[in-house]
Image: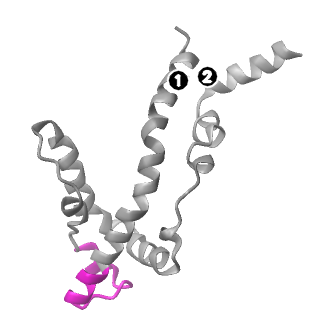
């Protein structure tokens, strides 16, 4: 089976959840921004005080998801990792709060943007670009 056929099949499978995840991301980011604001207020930290912000340990994902099954342990560990480390990413806290305050997190991305084959897949997969180029040659 050619790699490009496998890529198309996998892409179709991934599309089933991609839009759901894209629409739910805003909810998680808004909750994270709220949690950060609350923690910073409780501890008297300003968003510009990067050293103190880096020490924050979120519980957003731990509180947002219920992962009771033993098979979900790896997912649970990933959520713990994100909560423990995201505040340490340079400018993340300031940028996230700014996005939340601007209302940008209230917007749901359109399906056309989320599932844009060209920017999400074609621009990143040499095999698929070759198929498109060869189809163009065969068409002429």
Report the disc number at residue 127.
2
Residue found 27% across the figure and 57% down from its top: 82
Question: 18 and 132: which one is in front?
Answer: 18
The crowd level at tag 1 (other Cα within 10 Å; few <14, some 14-19, many 20+) is some
- Circles 2 and 1, Cβ within 8 Å, touching? The answer is yes
From the viewer's perspective, tell me whether residue 125 is left or right of residue 56: right
| Quarter of the view holding residue 126 | top right
Residue 70 lies in the magenta-colored region: no
Report x, y in % for residue 103.
51, 76
Residue found 22% across the figure and 74% down from its top: 55
- Magenta stretch, residue numbers: 37-55
Determine the residue located farthest toward the bottom in the rendered image: 44
| Quarter of the view holding residue 54 | bottom left
Residue found 51% across the figure and 29% down from its top: 12
From the viewer's perspective, tell me whether residue 84 is left or right of residue 125: left
Determine the residue located farthest toward the top in the rendered image: 1
Report x, y in % for residue 46.
33, 88
Report x, y in % for residue 83.
24, 62
Predominant secondary structure, magenta span: helix
């Amino acid at each position: 089976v050619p790699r490009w056929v496998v890529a198309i099949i996998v892409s179709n499978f991934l599309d089933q959840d991609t839009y759901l995840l894209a629409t739910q991301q805003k909810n998680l980011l808004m909750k994270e921004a709220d949690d950060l604001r609350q923690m910073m207020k409780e501890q008297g930290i300003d968003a510009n005080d990067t050293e103190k912000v880096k020490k924050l340990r979120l519980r957003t994902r731990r509180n947002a998801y219920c992962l009771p099954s033993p098979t979900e342990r790896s997912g649970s560990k990933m959520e713990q990792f994100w909560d423990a480390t995201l505040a340490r990413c340079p400018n993340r806290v300031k940028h996230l709060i700014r996005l939340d305050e601007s209302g940008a997190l209230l917007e749901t991305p359109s399906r056309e943007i989320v599932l844009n084959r060209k920017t999400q897949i074609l621009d990143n997969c040499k095999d698929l670009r070759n198929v498109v180029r060869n189809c163009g040659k065969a068409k002429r």
